[in-house]
Amino acid sequence: MTVLPVTIWGEPVLHRRAAEVEVFDDELRTLIADMFETNEAANGVGLAAPQVGVGKRLFVYKYPNDDDAPDEGVLVNPVLTLSKIPGSLPDPEEDVEGCLSFPGEHYPLQRAEWARVQGFDGEGKPVDFVATGWFARVMQHEFDHLDGKLYVDRLIDRYAKKAMRQAKKNGWGVPGLSWMPGVDPDPFGH
């Protein structure tokens, strides 16, 4: 298994819809193993293929939950069905997200409290479970990556402006930027 570099906001693969996985083979299984290794090295709760420069519809996650779903898994070609997203403002303490591809930053974002997650595992076997609370947030966050969206693309104006100022300050928004989990300092201080 190999730890892969994590792409940073501005890398084109992060901003376009990923392609469906059509073949469940050793190449896919190697990518999945490398993504698990990278997620672990980055202290992440989830990692989508576009975040390691691969435009395919899959993500891995590692998040303890009470939803009768595995605490660690992979979703290939996932489909999410969501409960209604509350129309209230996000709580600046309780609803804060971060992203390995927008490293070191945190902003509040309102998400659906419930998600039905369907897709396939790395062998092509069906996966179907319900996620609630923060586990549902993780599923939505990773799924967004497969549609070319980062959580900062969903922020309300006040936080979106802060995020874009920070991106500019960090020199992000251009292709070719990445960081290496386990080598570079942990941007979230784990």
Image (cartoon, helix red, strand yellow):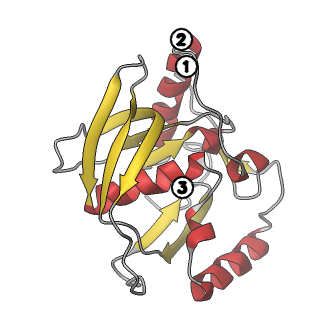
Horizontal relation, residue 166 to residue 86: left or right: right
* Circle nearer the viewer, 3 or 2: 2
Q: Which residue reaches farthest top?
A: 26
Residue 28 is tagged as 1
Instruction: From the image, tell me which residue sits under label 2.
Output: 25
CA distance for labels 3 and 1: 27 Å
Is 82 rendered above or below residue 164? above
- Looking at the picture, tell me which residue is in the foreground, 58 or 105: 58
Q: Are marks 2 and 1 in contact (CB under 8 Å)?
A: yes
Q: Residues within 10 Å of mark 3 (few under 14, many from 20)?
A: some
Q: Callout 1: helix, strand or loop? A: helix
Residue 186 is tagged as 3
Instruction: Name the quadrant of the C terminus.
Output: bottom left
Type of amino acid at the residue the image marks with label 1: Leu
Residue at 44% of width from left, 55% of height from top? 140
The picture quadrant where one finds residue 167 is bottom right
Q: Earlier in the sequence, mark 3 or mark 2?
A: 2
Q: Are marks 3 and 1 in contact (CB under 8 Å)?
A: no
Q: Callout 2: helix, strand or loop? A: loop
Q: How many marks?
A: 3
The picture quadrant where one finds residue 55 is top right
CA distance for labels 3 and 2: 32 Å
Q: Callout 3: helix, strand or loop? A: loop
Residue at 62% of width from left, 33% of height from top? 56
Is 98 rendered above or below residue 89? above
- Looking at the picture, tell me which residue is in the foreground, 41 or 92: 92
Type of amino acid at the residue the image marks with label 3: Asp
Q: Residues within 10 Å of mark 2 (few under 14, many from 20)?
A: few
What is the x, y in percent for residue 72?
31, 37
Horizontal relation, residue 44 to residue 71: left or right: right
